[in-house]
């Protein structure tokens, strides 16, 4: 069954972790009769938190979709993660919806993650309404939450309903639009008159609502100033126009777990959030021709060419890959061929499904504005654009933040390395915020993600889905060694014990080179004291010894080695002998060359709210960081630019989250190498020596 575009509402449920998003989806699905019971997060019985890791941790780790019908409208709901480690998934989902319900807790108000997700919604120009949740809990405060909203977002938060009672006595809501009261018994509303005790509050909030509506329309403002009453239709039109154009934020309230105020919320979604057609009027559907770069527009109608965007991929070792997409124009039909404009490949579409959590409901086609899924596409990834052949365009891809934390991983069972690599690449399809590579210097497998919990969950999924157990440890630092003084020494290798022996003898001088120069070999042999064919072997011996390090086993850089003297044996000399002699000469010369350890320095940019500036700079200084500058940013934020030793900042994501209550973000990139302070260098050498003994 395909719905008229104007009867569709694609809605993301967004908020900080623990605000009640998944519980709200449960109540919506139950009230709309899409399910016959309300599951709970505590029992692990909800529709949209169905992954084992979510049930165990009692948090949403991955976004999930569900659908229901209410009063002739199709609701496509996206339950999104709110914890800082997982909100990049939320960013991607917001690119696929037309509106959002933002949950604010009546206990804690607006939290850090909510601010970040709010910014994502602003980027995609998404109209939203706020649901103040948990009004049945102890210390719940509707006015506090309302005030916090205005302070945080600087927009007018306009209540469309207010609570009846509070905490244990919370029993219903008063509808300020239709001026009716609804009290609830076991989730069932009973309509009645407004209680006398609330008439003053109703008058106050209703006046605020009417003023805001009048301000958004000149004709209505004139009518209001003349003292005339706005009609019910004018009030509804004003609320819809103000919400869709984001002139104000409509606010409703209730309790998801006690199913109070949910039916009023559903009515408010129909009134205040846009259809795919409305959204296309606010933000036109536009992409670029992949060949010419020219802008192309589409309308959300069935007669236009197909255009759809993939906003999520689910990796399943048994069912194969599941691709979730939003259709913007045209119709995607089952058992047809489509074109992936992003990757320039054709794909065969098999079955199409609507998803109710993990339950798949087969359909023949998905039309404009719909959200659906298809199984087993070969090459299509999250962010790709799917079109008809011959009508190509590419939607702007979602830009994910760079990973914030890296760990080395190794197989728990020897020989599982290949399995790890294969399984992780499947996980990367599902989660574009993960990065995986093998470090050329340390030979370690490195997994990077948005935080420690993110990586832990990934490894739990790896074990559950693909049967691969992995150990996680702090990655090795790619230190380097170099020399600070000129030194000369002999390397003489002689092995003669009957028959043909081995003989190689060379003198070399080593000297430091400027930073970044690498290695230089100079041949100063004269008079044939070492035959020409053996000189490359001396160089190879020196290079091999440099790879193994001179004091702590780290590669040697920025050094010149000059070969200037030596001797050979007409019978016993060989390339191997001179290679060993070259290696011995370097090790002997190193004893007087003042060998030092160099550490990698990274360039870090940290963006934080003003109030944390002092604490974060102090923390960077304590990590031997050098702050290069501070620049003011929009929204009362500051950007700190600093250079910090890599060894001090490997787990910085956790520390920054702790310092800023999750409101700080940072990026880092390799900068250069600097000498390690001598007291730390001694520790590094001692640790390396100890590690070698254990091996």
Image: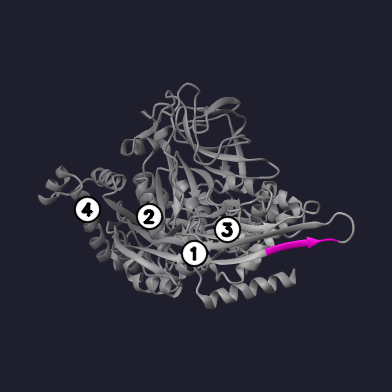
Is tag 1's residue or tag 4's residue first in the polypeptide sequence?
Answer: 4
Residue position for label 2: 118
Residues in magenta, as a range: 491-496
Residue position for label 1: 653
Compare residues 662 and 60 and report the one nearer the observer. 662
The image's colouring method is one colour
122 displayed left or right of 385: left
Which residue is the extreme one toward the bottom? 679
Residue position for label 3: 561
Query: Compared with residue 7, is residue 600 higher up or lower down, i.e. above or below?
Result: below
| Mark number displayed over residue 212 | 4
Question: What predominant SS class does the magenta segment belong to?
Answer: strand
Label 1 and label 4: CA atoms lie apart by 42 Å
Camera-nearest label, 3 or 1: 3
Camera-nearest label, 4 or 3: 3
Query: Compared with residue 605, is residue 369 higher up or lower down, i.e. above or below?
Result: above
Q: Classify mark 2: helix, strand or loop.
A: helix
Is tag 4's residue or tag 2's residue first in the polypeptide sequence?
Answer: 2
């Amino acid at each position: 069954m395909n719905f008229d575009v104007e009867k569709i509402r694609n809605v993301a449920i967004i908020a900080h972790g623990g605000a009640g998003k998944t519980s709200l989806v449960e109540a919506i699905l139950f009230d709309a009769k899409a399910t016959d019971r309300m599951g709970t997060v505590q029992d692990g019985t909800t529709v949209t938190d169905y992954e084992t890791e979510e049930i165990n941790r009692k948090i949403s780790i991955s976004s999930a979709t569900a659908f229901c019908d209410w009063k002739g409208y199709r609701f496509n709901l996206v339950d999104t993660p709110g914890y800082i480690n997982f909100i990049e998934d939320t960013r991607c989902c917001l690119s696929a919806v037309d509106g959002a319900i933002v949950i604010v807790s009546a206990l804690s108000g607006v939290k850090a993650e909510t601010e970040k997700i709010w910014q994502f919604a602003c980027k995609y120009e998404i109209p939203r309404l706020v649901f103040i949740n948990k009004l049945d809990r102890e210390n719940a405060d509707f006015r506090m939450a309302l005030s916090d909203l205005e302070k945080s977002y600087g927009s007018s938060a306009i209540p469309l309903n207010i609570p009846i009672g509070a905490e244990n006595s919370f029993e219903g809501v008063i509808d300020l639009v239709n001026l009716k009261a609804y009290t609830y018994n076991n989730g069932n509303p009973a309509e009645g008159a407004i209680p006398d005790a609330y008439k003053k509050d109703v008058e106050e909030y209703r006046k605020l609502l009417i003023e805001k509506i009048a301000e958004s329309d000149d004709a209505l403002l004139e009518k209001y100033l003349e003292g005339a009453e706005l009609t019910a239709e004018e009030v509804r039109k004003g609320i819809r126009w103000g919400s869709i154009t984001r002139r104000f934020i409509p606010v409703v309230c209730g309790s998801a777990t006690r199913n109070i105020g949910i039916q009023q919320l559903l009515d408010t979604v129909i009134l205040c959030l846009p259809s795919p057609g409305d959204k296309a009027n606010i933000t036109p559907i536009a992409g670029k021709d992949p060949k010419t770069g020219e802008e192309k527009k589409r309308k959300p109608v069935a007669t236009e060419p197909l255009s759809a965007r993939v906003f999520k991929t689910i990796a399943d070792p048994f069912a194969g890959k599941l691709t979730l997409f939003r259709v913007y124009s045209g119709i995607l039909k089952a058992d047809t061929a489509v074109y992936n404009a992003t990757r320039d490949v054709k794909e065969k579409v098999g079955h199409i499904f609507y998803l109710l959590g993990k339950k798949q409901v087969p359909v023949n086609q998905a039309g404009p504005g719909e959200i659906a899924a298809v199984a087993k596409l070969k090459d299509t990834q999250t962010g790709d654009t799917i079109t008809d052949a011959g009508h190509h365009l590419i939607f702007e891809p979602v830009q994910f933040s760079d990973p914030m934390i890296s760990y080395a991983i190794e197989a728990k069972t020897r020989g599982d390395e290949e399995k790890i690599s294969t399984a992780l690449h499947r996980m990367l399809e599902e989660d574009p915020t993960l990065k995986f590579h093998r470090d050329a210097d340390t030979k370690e497998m490195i997994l990077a993600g948005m935080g420690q919990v993110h990586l832990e969950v990934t490894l739990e999924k790896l074990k559950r889905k693909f049967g691969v157990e992995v150990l996680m440890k702090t990655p090795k630092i790619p230190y380097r060694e170099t020399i600070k003084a000129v030194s000369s020494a002999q390397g003489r290798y002689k092995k003669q014990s009957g028959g043909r022996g081995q003989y190689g003898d060379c003198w070399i001088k080593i000297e430091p080179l400027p930073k970044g120069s690498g290695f230089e070999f100079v041949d100063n042999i004269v008079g044939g004291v070492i035959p020409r064919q053996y000189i490359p072997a001396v160089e190879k011996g020196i290079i091999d010894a440099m790879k193994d390090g001179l004091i702590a086993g780290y590669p040697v850089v920025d050094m010149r080695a000059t070969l200037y003297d030596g001797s050979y044996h007409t019978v016993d000399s060989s390339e191997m002998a001179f290679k060993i002699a070259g290696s011995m000469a370097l090790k002997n010369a190193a004893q007087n060359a003042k060998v030092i350890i160099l550490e990698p320095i990274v360039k870090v940019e940290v963006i934080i709210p003003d109030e944390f500036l002092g604490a974060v700079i102090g923390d960077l200084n304590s990590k031997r960081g050098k702050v290069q500058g501070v620049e003011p940013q929009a929204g009362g934020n500051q950007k700190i630019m600093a250079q910090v030793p890599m060894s001090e900042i490997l787990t910085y994501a956790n520390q920054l989250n702790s310092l800023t209550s999750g409101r700080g973000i940072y990026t880092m990139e390799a900068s250069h190498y600097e000498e390690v302070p001598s007291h730390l260098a001694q520790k590094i050498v001692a640790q390396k020596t100890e590690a070698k003994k254990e091996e």
